[in-house]
Each structure stands twice: as C-alpha cells, then as structure tokens.
Image: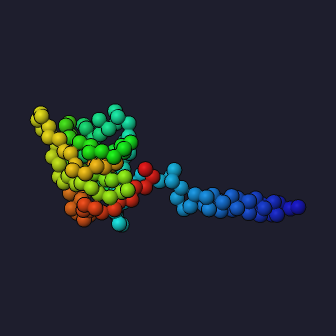
Amino acid sequence: MNSFHVSLRAKRSNLLIFFLIFLVFGTCPAWATTPSVCHQDNCVAVEVVSKDADMERGLMYRTGLDQNKGMLFVFDKDGKYSFWMKNMHFNLDMLWISSDGHIVYIGQNIPACTSDPCPVYTPDQTARYVLEINSGYVVSHHWKLADELKLNGI
C-alpha cells in the first residue's frame, strides 16, 4: 500500500470522527457555549451565580457591566427573592424569571444605593431566577412582563 492510500484512509477516519461528534453534540456543544438569556433575537451573556457567597456579593463593587452582559442568580426553588443595591456603582434593570422562563416581575432603572438603609426590591410573584442587566436594557429591547426567555447553558 502506498502512502497516498494510507493518507486517504487517515483523512476518512478523521472525517468520520468529526461527523460522529457533530451528530452527538450538534453545531455548538453545550459545554462550549457561554451561558445566556435570550428574548426573541437578542441575547445577554450571563455570569451565573448559585452559591450563597457569590449571590450575596453579586455585582457589588464593580464599576459597570459590558454591553449585552448580565448576572443571573439561580435559586434552588421558587420564591420571592429580595435584592438591594448596596455597594453598587451603577443602576440596573432586574428581572425575576419563573422556573419555566417567563418574566414575572421587572424592576427598571433601580438606582445604586448611596446611603443606609438601602431600599429592598421584592417581587410580587415567585421566581426561580433573577437577571441583573444594565439600566435601560428592558425598555430598549422591549422586554415585558410574561415574555418568555430562553436560558441557554444554565
């Protein structure tokens, strides 16, 4: 057998392996994607937090969020989770999201707290997730109560 046939066999083998991986994982495997929250045709890349210490700190002390970025708080069960803006340096929009992905409560342009005691923001509906995004995002992207969001890679 000459080297051309060996090389062709190796290329076919590699192509078969690639095709099998494509069939199993699709075009973009879940482990290779950035977690995101999407509404229709726009998405926000999110930092996902679910540990108590990370949830308590949230976005405190940060100077801002990049465009189309956010923080998603993931809770173990549905509840009326309260948030405040202590030690924040910028305003936020906050969305409380049900376990099935619907927006159940929206806090728009919530101001950074500048003095104690800081106001507490509590939804009137239970939620499983809370999304913090840049102030104005909800209005500029037409997100509203009851809209369905897709949580990718969460």
User: In front here: 146 or 30?
Assistant: 146
Position of 3 with respect to 14 (left or right) is right
Q: Nearer the viewer, residue 89 or 93?
A: 93
Q: Position of residue 148 (x, y in %)?
A: 34, 62
How many labels, in total?
Answer: 0
The residue at 27%/56% (across/down) is 104
Residue drawn at x 14%, y 37% as measured from the top left: 118
Whether residue 48 is visible here, answered yes or no, is yes
Q: Position of residue 7 (x, y in %)?
A: 77, 60
Residue 89 pos. (x, y %) = 19, 41
Left or right placement of residue 90 versus residue 132 in this view: left
The quarter of the image holding the N terminus is bottom right
Vertical placement of residue 44 versus 64, above or below? below
Q: Nearer the viewer, residue 51 or 115?
A: 51
Coloring scheme used: rainbow
Using the rendered view, name the quadrant where residue 143 is placed. bottom left
Classify residue 31 as left or right of residue 62: right
Examine the image and state in which quarter residue 59 appears. Answer: top left
Residue at image position (14%, 40%) is: 119
Residue 20 percent location from the top left of the image? 66, 60
Q: Is residue 90 visible?
A: no
39 with respect to 105 (left or right): right
Q: Residue drawn 82% across and 63% down?
A: 5
